Each structure stands twice: as structure tokens, then as C-alpha cells.
Image: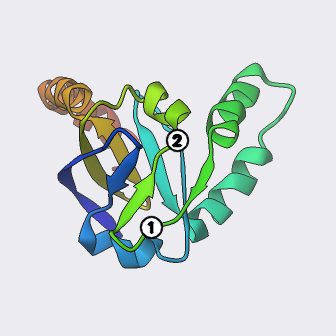
Amino acid sequence: MFIGEYNHSIDEKGRLAVPAKFRAELEDGAVVTRGLDNCLFLYTQQEWNILAPRIAQLPIHQANSRAFSRLMLSGAMDVQVDKQGRIIVPDYLRSYAKLKKKVVIAGLYNRLEVWDEAIWADYKMHTEEESGDIAEQLGELGV
């Protein structure tokens, strides 16, 4: 289970240190892909093996399904945690998420999200301001 918020740096070669407490869960491999809201999603290989077939089964005749499949599946890259606990984030994914030097890694139960620090700060501030409305809408869903 991934939880928490961690500040890290990404170097010019795209190497990103994974929080130490999560490295063991990723040692069998991981997949990083385009996420939503200008971030990247990082899944364990096991979690990706559950999610990817579900995405692939989306109806190809629906434009939104095709778009989502393309976003997630074509953007995916297998990554390995090196001996220093880092993964290499490919250029195209760093560009997609606008990652600069400082990043935030956020644990969201079954995935990690990788955010540019400034984008994360703006997103979090907006979400916190709207938290009452968000909670009310989720209440209607039984959450």
C-alpha cells in the first residue's frame, strides 16, 4: 500500500529516487505511464498486470475509450529500481508531466503519482479549497 507525500529531486538524466519505504514493493519491476492532471502514475508490475488488460478491453468504437487507452498504454514504460533506489523516467514522460528538478511523489494506495512540485502545490491548494464540495459529491456515491 502506497500512502504519503514525499519531496524528491529528479536529475538531468531522469533518475528519480523512490522513497525507501516503497522500494521493496517495486523490486520485481514497475511501470510508469502518463497519469491524469499533469502527473505520472507509477504502478507495481503486479498492479499494472491487473489494470492494463482492463484498459485494453475498453470499447474501441468509443472515442473516449480510445483516447484513454492511448494515453495510458502508449505512454507506459517498464522501469527497474537500481541499487541506489532510483528509476529512470523517460524524456517523453518528464515532458508530459512538466517535471523539473523538484518533484513530489504521492502515495495513492495502489499507485504512486509523480508531480512537478509547483504543479502539485497548485493542484493541492485548489483541491483543499474545494474539499467540502468534493466530499459532498462523494457522499452521494456512498464514500
Q: Report if residue 137 is visible in the image.
A: yes
Query: In the rendered image of this protein, does residue 128 appear above or below residue 5?
Result: above
Residue 90 is tagged as 2
Residue at position x 87%, y 26% in the image? 61
**Rendering coords of residue 128 (x, y %):** 14, 31
Q: Quadrant of residue 85?
A: bottom left
Residue 107, image x and y in percent? 30, 56
Please report the residue visible at 26 percent of the width from the left and 71 percent of the height from the top: 20
Instruction: Classify the position of the N terminus by image quarter.
Output: bottom left
Residue 104 picture location, percent across and down: 24, 44
Vertical placement of 114 versus 82: above or below? above
Image height of 78 relative to 57, above or below: below
For label 1, the residue is 81
List the single residue furthest toward the right: 61
Q: Residue at x 69, y 23 (%)?
A: 64
Residue sitting nearer the eye, 67 or 84: 84
Q: Position of residue 135 (x, y in %)?
A: 24, 37
Can see residue 142?
no
Q: Which mark is residue 100?
A: none
Q: Report helix, strand or loop for mark 1.
A: loop
Q: Is residue 46 left or right of residue 25?
A: right
Q: Residues within 10 Å of mark 2 (few under 14, many from 20)?
A: some
What secondary structure is found at the residue carrying circle 2? loop
The image quadrant that residue 138 belongs to is: top left
Q: Residues within 10 Å of mark 1 (few under 14, many from 20)?
A: many
Amino acid type assigned to the residue bearing label 2 in the image: Pro
**Residue drawn at the location 75% of the way across and 55% of the way down:** 53
